[in-house]
Image (cartoon, grey):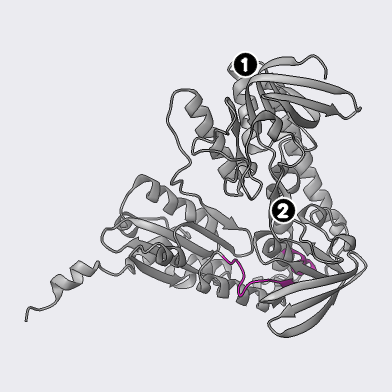
Amino acid sequence: MNQPEKYDVLILGSGAAGKLMAWTMAKEGMRTAIVERKYIGGSCPNIACLPSKNVIHSAKVASLVGRHWEFGIDTGPFAIDMAQVYARKREMVDGIVKVHVDKYRAAGDELIFGNGAFVAPRTLQVTLRDDSERTLTADRVFVNTGTHASMPDTPGLREAKPMTHIEALDLQRLPEHLIVIGGGYVGLELGQALRRFGSRVTIVERGPQLVSSEDGDAAQAILQLFRDEGIDVVFNARVLSVDGLSGSRVRLQLQSGNAAQTLEGSDILLATGRTPNTDAIGLEKAGIEVTEKGHIRVNDRLETSAPNVWALGECAGSPYFTHVSEDDFTIVHANLNGSHRSTKDRLVPSCVFIDPEFARVGLNESQARERGIPYRVASVPVDVAAWRPWTLSERRGFLKALVDAHSDRILGFTAFGPSAGELMGTVQLAMLAGVPYTTLRDAMFAHPTMTEALKMLFMGVPQRPENHAAERPAG
């Protein structure tokens, strides 16, 4: 082992939390090094959140062009150029990476490219791209290694070389028939996008509904959207085996209940979950424990079992969202400066960037029932709640709110429709501020906007049970 080089701060992985920690610590005068295996800025700006939303927007434009007569426009014949879709995405990614490089330079970090693994407490050995090695040690170490797409142990699946989101976002051709394994966020977003570009798409879901963590009404609304767009969905289906090569011709043997089924297509997109990047990085040599699921074990301050070592983001088992990883950074940095922040009871928003968007913050009905929390519920179609969807010709969807049964506290909000993610942010702010739902019900919002739909939604909240009791006549 080389003589260790000493730093104040050492960060393994340059994802959302890692890069924020690096920039901040370096600006605060600490000698900081960050070790990154491949992607400057982590997965989000390179192969996940941002490029996927770029491609999804191109697919929305394709959908709008396909509806040109509806808007009084005659486009004539048009065609999808997947190479140009890729080029637009690539230009955006290159620009964002440059912004990241500039931030590293401005902060004064040392950005080291290579594969890092612990060889002792708070000590990393890094194999650089030229195969040389460096040994680094620090007073404080932060691990932010993220996750990768899971590969089920299905006969023939690995040999078929299925796409993950990474390869799907680099497509410069249009799959003839895309088979998506998994009905979660990635499968829904990319499945709809490629359908709008012109692929035939079939989604194979192991459970009884799409977006398994959501209420049945939400899952049904999304299913109807997909069926209306010509996407086939197979439920309660287990993939028994796979033959062929993705990109050419594949054949899947499925088991659905007592029935067997053969599904043939040209490509496979694997979207069955994520696996933490915690293997083969020497965690045991640093005294860092992992959970049964492979995440680094942390407490509610994101401290690991090793002194002065923190884990941030997905590798620590935090919810798999970039905004959560960023919040992990905020919590740890605040605590290093004397605060007492915790990951407990965080209000975590989520958004599925299908079109229209699906967003939720707080509890849905299924979760409230499971936890025995009494609630009142209001629900309204988006085109009843506001006129804005009519102006956009985007009238599909609904809004739903859960309010505490015995107070006016908002417990949760679900939106499926235009600008659902932005609407969610307004309700989330109200929930964080602890204001009653009546504040949104009685607010004056600009017309015609989607936000004014919140007025109509919260006007539909039933009265408290005790209020009804008080109104009943005596005797």
The residue beneath circle 2 is 52
Q: Which of the numbered marks, if any, corresponds to residue 3? A: none
- Residue range in magenta is 193-212
Q: Nearer the N terminus, badge 2 or badge 1?
A: 1
Residue 176 can be seen, yes or no: no
Q: Which of the numbered marks, if any, corresponds to residue 30? A: 1
Looking at the picture, how far across and down is residue 379, in whole percent?
Answer: 41, 70
Tell me which corner region of the image, top left, top right, bottom left or bottom right, holds residue 129. top right
Looking at the picture, how far across and down is residue 234, in whole percent?
Answer: 70, 77
Looking at the picture, how far across and down is residue 61, in whole percent?
Answer: 71, 62
Identify which amino acid the numbered label 1 is placed on: Met
Kindly state the secondary structure of the residue where label 2 is placed. Answer: helix
> For this rendering, which residue is in front, 351 or 250?
250
Tell me the quarter of the image containing the C terminus: bottom left
Q: Which residue shows up at 52% across the image and 73% down it? A: 216
Residue 321 can be seen, yes or no: yes
Mark 1 neighbour density, 10 Å: few (under 14) some (14–19) many (20 or more)? some
Tell me the quarter of the image containing the N terminus: top right
Identify which amino acid the numbered label 2 is placed on: Ser
Q: Which residue shows up at 53% across the image and 28% down it? A: 333
